[in-house]
Amino acid sequence: MTSTLLRGRTLSFLRWPETVDDHCAWRYEDDGGLLLRDGRIVAAGAYADVEKKADEGVKKIDHRPHLLLPGFIDAHAHFPQMQVIASYGAELLDWLNTYTFPEETKFQNAQHGRRIARLFLDEMVRHGTTTVAAYCSVHKGSAEAFFAESHDRNMLNIAGKVMMDRNAPEGVLDTAQSGYDDSKALIKEWHGKGRQHYAITPRFAITSSPEQLEMAGALCREYPDLHMQTHLSENHAEIAFTLQLYPQARDYTDVYERYGLLGRKSLFGHCIHLSEREADALSDSGSVAVFCPTSNLFLGSGLFNYQRYRTRYKALRIAAATDVGGGTNYSMLRTMDEGYKVIALNGEKLNPFQSFWQLTRGNAEALSVVERIGTLDQGSDADIIVLDARATPAMRLRMETADTLAEELFLLQTLGDDRAVREVYVAGRVMKSDLGLNVGP
């Protein structure tokens, strides 16, 4: 297979950056090179050094003066909610009943599922997201559609059929047994096929009976290497209803704890209103709290206390996510812009290196896939994005006075969107240049 040699300013993280001067936390090359072969990065470093390792017939692509980073990672999104995004005026439970459940009923139609899966992954790529942890609908066909589209693109994605057997319209319900059976069939068909990862996906405690959560726990025991994803502590009314449904539980987290759903590959969306006991339980189990700032602000759910969770005595593992369609943008740049503001409202600041660590290596660590993605290290999968900090007139003007890499990154985070993403490579394959805008049936 022909090798490809990329040239540009390369930035990749080694660990959490404590400050903007913590240069040991990242690797930056002002004239960097990435040698790609068979979907992997086989050499990285200064361009002059990497060029020496290239084959004679290597294809060279010069992206200077732009930045080359690992592809962004979105730790929580709902692909069936593309036509729900930007729906007015409801809080969480009303939002689900008024907009989400009726929309997800449409996914009984396999053709509809395939169309939306295609358009969803197009939007991910357009915005520089090369990996997403996605919720499908309750319908087995929606997960089949998602994985088929993902596999066609050779993307590393994590997804699962939602399990929900109560407190929702008939068109979006399964049963405890059918949810188990469908999930098991999908695991057999898709987990480990190419770059696909299956996530056991009970939507949340309100829409799953005790019998269904027991079945979800059984799947976690049968397939301990799989992810589990659900929602936790997003909204006060949600918490109160959950405790009515599970009166024996000490708190919301305890519901999931009782069914064996906590663990290092367990992803809990939102986690806004956790008690200290709940935060301890998540920390002790290595579970991940997923920060969804645009969704939390849009639905009025509350402010995720990022810095407290990160620095408490029993720190939490944290990921960041769009949560489309409660979230209001597909862009992880826009997500961290709103995340910065949420953190500021809690009296802290997130420096731009920390933001970009979270979008890349930080999310890869949280999703337990950092050995594959999230860095530009030799041996990593070649999921790479090219960012242009002068993509719009306003950005070009601001860049006239940006003198440091930190200022450039903060400008990208604050003013950037899909227009700042000049190119996307998925497993070494050019994706954004080839992306169409077809929205037909």
Image (spheres, rainbow, N blue to C red):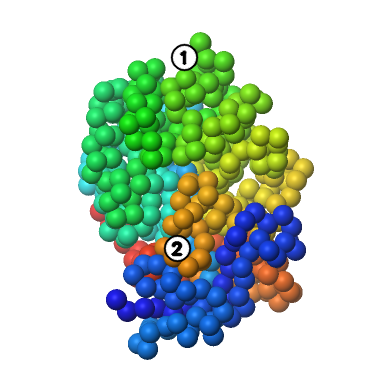
N-terminal label among 2 and 1: 1
Name the mark nearer the viewer: 2 or 1. 2
- What's under tag 1, amino acid-wise? Leu
Q: Is residue 20 visible?
A: yes
Q: Position of residue 77 (x, y in %)?
A: 45, 44
Residue 97, located in which quarter of the rendered image? Answer: top left
Identify residue for label 2.
380
Between residues 124 and 268, which one lies in front from this camera angle?
A: 268
Identify residue for label 1.
245
- What's under tag 2, amino acid-wise? Ser
CA gap, disc 2 and disc 1: 45 Å
Q: Is residue 172 left or right of residue 256?
A: left
Q: Residue furthest right?
A: 347
Q: Which mark is residue 360?
A: none
Which secondary structure lies at badge 2? loop
At label 2, counting other C-alpha atoms closer than 10 Å, the crowd grade (few under 14, some 14-19, many 20 or more) is many
